[in-house]
Each structure stands twice: as structure tokens, then as C-alpha cells.
Image (tube, rainbow, N blue to C red):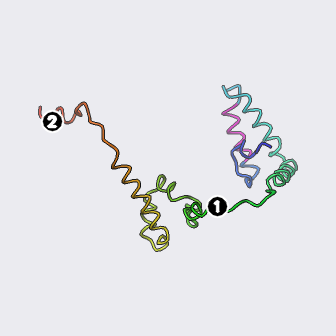
Amino acid sequence: MTNLYAVLLVDPAADREVIRAAYRVLARRFHPDHGGDPARMVELAAAWAILGHAAKRAEYDRSRRESLTPAAPIPAQPPSMAGDLLDFGRYQGWTVMALADHDPDYLEWLARAPAGRAWRNRIDTVFAARQAAAATLVPTPRTTRSRRTRWAGRR
């Protein structure tokens, strides 16, 4: 079953007006008259035909909920991953490694803050690994001098 909300790039809890606005923006981008993809436009129109009407949307949501209910319980995360996920703040659900790529300043603050005491060892490990990787990189020599150094002695 195709996720119609993903086709229109909206959240399932979005209002009808938000869904309508998303449809209109995507329709302008993918309409064949404007050089867009005809197959993508067909998907967009089909999604709007269902999500644009309250009764059809309610029926779709009900069938989607029934198909998404798991038959078996979802297994818990392995302990190595569960201990690596932040469980608070604006980065809740992020791993420390992903956060080091995205916002290293936040991790440095978290390591110093009282709330981050439990994470300090993991954060230090990530930063130490990054420093070791950076130390192994060999800078490439420059073959030409910059304009500033080339003309510095001729003034």
C-alpha cells in the first residue's frame, strides 16, 4: 500500500489546507505542461483525490492503521544501540555519532552540562576517534603560491 502522505510530503496529522498547499506546490513542479514527470503527477493527483476529501481520508487512515499494526511485538533495541541514543532535549532519538556530525558544539556543551554526565564517556570516545582520524589525514602540498604571497615581495 502506497503511503499517500509520503507522496505529498506531509505529516499524517496535517490539516486539509496544509495537504492542499503541498499538493499545489508539487503539482506546479511536476506537471507535464511545465516539463515535469507525468507519472509523478498521476501519483500526486491520486493522493489528493483521497486526502482532499474528509470521508475518503478517514477511510484511508482507518485502512492504513489496520495495515500498520504489527502482528508480532517489535523487538527492543540491542543494548549497544539503546545506550547510544539521546533520550531528552531537541536531539531526542539521535545517536551520539550522528550528532557529532550534525552539531558538535552541542555535544561539547552536553559533555560539560550536568545533564550530560551520563554521556560524557561516550562523547569523549567519539571526539577522540575523530581526532585520531584527523591526525591520520596527510595534507596535500600546494603546487602554486597564492596571489597574495606571489605579489607580496613586489610592492
Verify whether residue 39 appears in magenta: no
Side of 145 where 60 appears, left or right: right
Q: Determine whether, in the image, residue 142 is placed left or right of residue 37.
A: left
Q: Position of residue 105 (x, y in %)?
A: 42, 59
What crowding class fits label 2: few (fewer than 14 Cα within 10 Å), some (14-19), or many (20 or more)?
Answer: few
Q: Amino acid at mark 2?
A: Ala
Range drawn in magenta = 19-30
Question: Residue 100: where, in percent of width, then height?
Answer: 47, 56
Marking on residue 152 = 2
In magenta segment, residue 27: yes
| Residue drawn where x is 85% and y is 51% of the image | 63
Q: Amino acid at mark 1?
A: Gln
- Check the picture and name the quadrant holding the C terminus: top left
Q: Quadrant of the N terminus?
A: top right
Q: Residue 42: x percent and y percent?
A: 77, 32
Question: Where, by quadrant of the figure, is residue 93 drawn?
Answer: bottom right
- Going from N to C along the chain, the mark reached first, 2 or 1, is 1
* Residue bearing the label numbered 1: 77
